[in-house]
Amino acid sequence: MKKIYCITSGEYSDWRISYAFEDKNKRDELLKFLNSTKNYECFEEYEIELQDDNIDVKNHTNYYICNIYCDNKMEIEINEVNTIIRKRKNEVVMHYENKLYSYEFEIPKEEYENPGKYEEKWKKIFYDKSAEVNYMLSEGLSVWEVEKILNKEWLNMTTLEKYILYL
């Protein structure tokens, strides 16, 4: 698959792609130069796979997700998304303080349409996942290893396994 090789700069809402190249060597040469100059910005490499042949707007499916954030207080957000906007239907995000920060998982349409009825179930799912994270950390895994394992684990599960897991 063809890639575009980029140089990015900025952080958070100021993050942007500053340069884009078809040739990785040209990108690397400019990146080295930019980072060797006395500049207040830090430039980083970024690669994008071209999707010219992979996107068919007529062939997608909608699905529903619940995303629970828990820093100082728990927040629940539910959304309808589609397979073009989001390829992943589940994601674990760890907090820098070695705890589960957010957990996003697919939910049935019935739950999306009746959120008040399922809020306690979603909280339990989050707490169960948080306990799993804490156990993995107690076994000596790093935050990054836990995040990678749990995100990969979900991607390898069948739809039936996911459904059974959260009945």
Image (cartoon, rainbow, N blue to C red):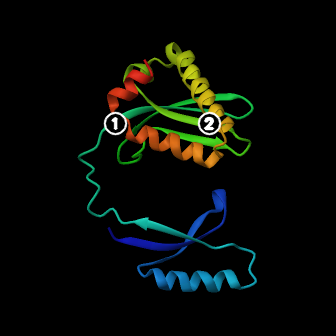
Q: Residue 70 carries which label?
A: none
Whether 96 is drawn above or below 78: the answer is below
Judged from this view, the residue extending furthest toward the top is 117
Q: Quadrant of the N terminus?
A: bottom left
- Horizontal and vertical percent for residue 82? 37, 41
Q: Is residue 72 left or right of residue 16?
A: right
Q: Which of marks 1 and 2 precedes in the sequence?
A: 1
- Horizontal and vertical percent for residue 65? 46, 32
Amino acid identity at mark 2: Met
Tell me which residue sits at (59%, 30%) in the image: 132
Mark 2 residue crowding within 10 angstroms, few (<14) / some (14–19) / many (20+):
some
- Horizontal and vertical percent for residue 100? 64, 36
Name the one closer to the observer, 74 or 153: 153
Name the one closer to the observer, 1 or 164: 164
CB-based contact (under 8 Å), mark 2 and mark 1: no
Amino acid identity at mark 1: Asn
Whether 8 is drawn above or below 116: the answer is below
Tell me which residue sits at (26%, 62%) in the image: 53
Tell me which residue sits at (41%, 41%) in the image: 155
Mark 1 residue crowding within 10 angstroms, few (<14) / some (14–19) / many (20+):
few
Judged from this view, the residue extending furthest toward the front is 139
Tell me which residue sits at (67%, 80%) in the image: 35
Name the residue carrying label 2.
136
- Horizontal and vertical percent for residue 73? 72, 29
Q: Is mark 2 on a helix, strand or loop?
A: helix
Q: What element carries label 1?
A: strand
Q: Answer with the quarter of the image where residue 31 lies.
A: bottom right
Name the one closer to the observer, 122 or 157: 157
Q: Residue 62 carries which label?
A: 1
Q: Answer with the quarter of the image where residue 113 lies.
A: top left
Q: In which quarter of the image is the C terminus?
A: top left
Whether 35 is drawn above or below 161: the answer is below
